[in-house]
Image (cartoon, rainbow, N blue to C red):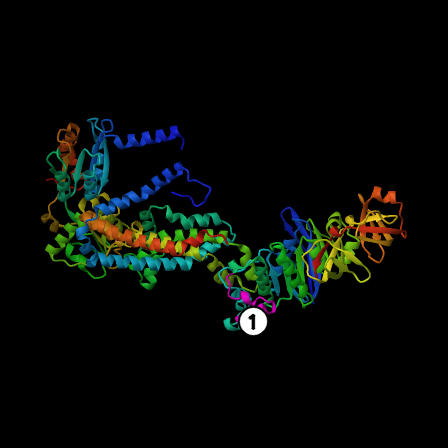
Amino acid sequence: MSRPVSIVVAAALVAACSSGPRGGDTLVVFAASSLNDVFTALATDSESGVSADFSFAGSSTLATQIVNGAPANVFASADERQMEVVISASTNAGAPVVFATNSLVLAVERGNPRGVHALADIDEPGLLVALAAQQVPLGQYSREMLASAQVEVTPVTLEPDARSVLAKVEMGEVDVGIVYRTDAMSSDEVDFIDLDESRMLSIDYYVVALDRSDDEAQAFIDRLVGTDGQQVLLNAGFGLP
Amino acid sequence: MTSRRANGRTPIVIVVLGAVACLVFALPLVALLVRVPWRSVGSILTSAAALEALWLSIVTSVVTTLLALGIGVPLAWLLARTHFFGKTFVRAVCTLSMVLPPVVAGVALLATYGRRGIIGSPLEAVFGLRLPFTMPAVVIAQLFVAMPFLVLTVESAFNSADQTVEDAARTLGASALYTFVHVNLPQARSSIIAGAVLTWARALGEFGATITFAGNFPGTTRTLPIATYLSLESDLGEALAMSMMLVVVSLTVLIAMRARFLPTLGESR
Amino acid sequence: MTLSAEFVRRLGAVTLDVTVHVDRGETLAIVGPNGAGKTSTLRTLAGLERIDSGLVSWSNEVWDDPSSQTFRGPDERAVGFVFQQFALFDHLSVLDNVAFGLRARGVRRIEARRRASELLDQLSAHALAHRAPVTLSGGEAQKVALARSLAVSPHVLLLDEPFAALDATSRTDARRLLQEQRGDGLARILVTHDAVDALTLADRILVMENGRVTQIGTPDELVAMPRTMFAAEILGLNPLRGRLAGQVLDLGNMTLTVGAHECSDGAALAVIRPRSVSLHVAQPEGSPRNVWTSSIAGVDRSVDRVRVRLAGPLPIAVEVTHGGFEALGLREGDTVWASVKASEISVRQG
């Protein structure tokens, strides 16, 4: 590498590493994957002129990234525990608020060919069931609900996230999957059955400004808990706190 | 640092750039070791779940490697020694999975061997066989992703092998098949072993295609990389300890194989 | 029993057009410049390459006949091939190299090794049996390659430049070995670029240029009357057989003093290049060692040279320039003095 070229490359690397959390006046929002559609809709409808960059992933992945210095301004978590991880590692984060709730459903192939109508139906032999792994919140919730409803089921697979469970149902590889209501609603390929049993689980979504003096972050959160935001959330299948 | 050639000093620029390249690999490994929770490593790694995942990983990756040897070496020979229309295209198809995102590979495998798949659907209808979520599915996923390493390595060995040795065997009365088994294979021995080791290492670390196609269930399809990924969701320490186990197992085999077989690769005949 | 080949084969720029017949017990040498198609001809006869048209056969057995879609692969022809670089199997011992062909033909391992061992004994190479090919010298490797190809009792033995990869000492041994093997019942074809090897080892010589056979005949015929410039240059030599004792070669009816050599006493072959012989009308001044009188048996004029054939006691061909020949004023039947320096006579064992 010639000297001028290496200097340019080095300068570019330094610049790329040191660019702050706020590139221009764009808000950086780290949000749980299940919020993808809602947040994207909210950003495009926005009249405030605030533009936001989103990073969607599992709540725990996002929490790990934020704790390790990822440049996020807002963190929206589907899991209280991951919110705690972020708050306890932060010195100037604001107070997290619950802005939505979710519930669990049985996702089945469109038309429900196996005639599944209630949680008690899924222990039928020969029925292929996919659950989320117990290491992720969805998996915890599913186990908790099955246990309290006293339904014993042997899944064929324990998927790493809700999307993967849904995909297995969509592709017809399993007959039933337990997923979040919002995931089931986002898919055209599946029908779903609401489960009263999941009411006892409080599946709460938290949002926080990682710098409590960040006005734009606060404005985003205000919109989320305001009338517009709540309507979008309802449309997507969320419940309200 | 001394160069092997007595008359050549190693240029400092190359040393610096090479060292940077080495750090690209070494730093994350070192960082991993630093973060491993050493006090609890013993109990994590000897837990039934970790051992089960390790055992499953080793069994499936070894089966994958044997299958790859069985069918990948003949493919490499065909690619190296025969001429047919569309060979370039066939070679590209056979090595495409190296660049395909593993998750896409998994979806492709579902579309093939899944319940609605072009093979899977008749398979279930006729034989009642179901591949997804089974141990054979893990092997198929690994084979799909890892076999190109064997095919490419062995093909280049067949390409560079001295063809007059093959001619000699033919004039001595050896059929093409006898020549393949008794001349081509021994000639390519070092490369076959190297390719098999690479394939095995890739299969051992396979995650994306496996979890998409074979799913995740303890004892049947939860391999060590999948167990590691899932523990990342709940317990970072456990994930680090299991990653370390993967690193140690792979590194041991790679070093042992290199010491035993790979030096002969560079020798001229 | 005869190997018959009359074929055409297109090889990029060159088209091979070869007609050749070699009998059992006969040795044919193919000589020609680089790129003439010598090696391709051998490979074609072995079945490693296929012909475009024509016929290759051994007696009544058709090996390659495109018109009837008949083709026997190299493993279905009784040919032995000794490759220029020997092409030994590095992963097998010498013994197993020699046994390879028998094993490939279904002979059991113990029997194959026994026969391989016998063959190595016959070639005085049994000491090599358990060596690895990579540890062999060129001469040893060639012996093994020869043993390996003879192990399967071929009808036809093809040798591609058998001396090219050898050092000087091994060459002498290898030539002696091939000399000893002559007339062993094989039809042998030897490709070489060394005319002396062709003259000494072959019953007939085929001159190949640019894919075509330009001349074929016995060594004597070719030496007496080379048909092309190339043949004249490399084959228009004068081979002489005699017995060597120190620097003196006894030809029976006369003796010659020869140049420095490494041969032991006994049967030897000497070569005198036609251009190194001088002709004189009277006994030459000075004292060249080898001087004799003869008469002119014939005169052939080519473009740049005159080829003078001498009668006994030493019937050789001499080449002189037109100018030089005119100056001597000689004609057929005239008596002439011939001389040649000792250093111009090279000798070979054999």
In terms of secondary structure, what is the magenta stretch mainly?
helix
Residues packed near mark 1 inside 10 Å, few (<14), some (14 to 19) or many (20 plus): some
Which residue does the numbered mark 1 point to in the structure image?
A: C115
Q: Chain of mark 1?
A: C
**In terms of depth relative to the viewer, which is nearer, C179 or A159?**
C179
Point out the residue furthest to the front here: C286
Would residue C33 be found to the left or right of residue B247 on screen?
right
- Amino acid type at mark 1: Arg
Q: Quadrant of residue C117?
A: bottom right
Would residue A77 be found to the left or right of residue C182 on screen?
left
Q: Could you say where residue C236 lies in the image, as x and y percent from the top left?
A: 76, 52
- Residue at image x 19%, y 42%? A59
Q: Is C115 part of what is drawn in magenta?
A: yes
Q: Is A111 part of what is drawn in magenta?
A: no
Q: Inspect this view and state whether residue A155 appears.
A: no
Quadrant where the N terminus of chain C is found in the figure: bottom right
Would residue C23 be found to the left or right of residue B33 on screen?
right
User: Magenta span covers which residues?
Assistant: C112-132
**Circle 1 sits in a helix, a strand or a loop, which is it?**
helix
Would residue C132 be found to the left or right of residue C287 on screen?
left
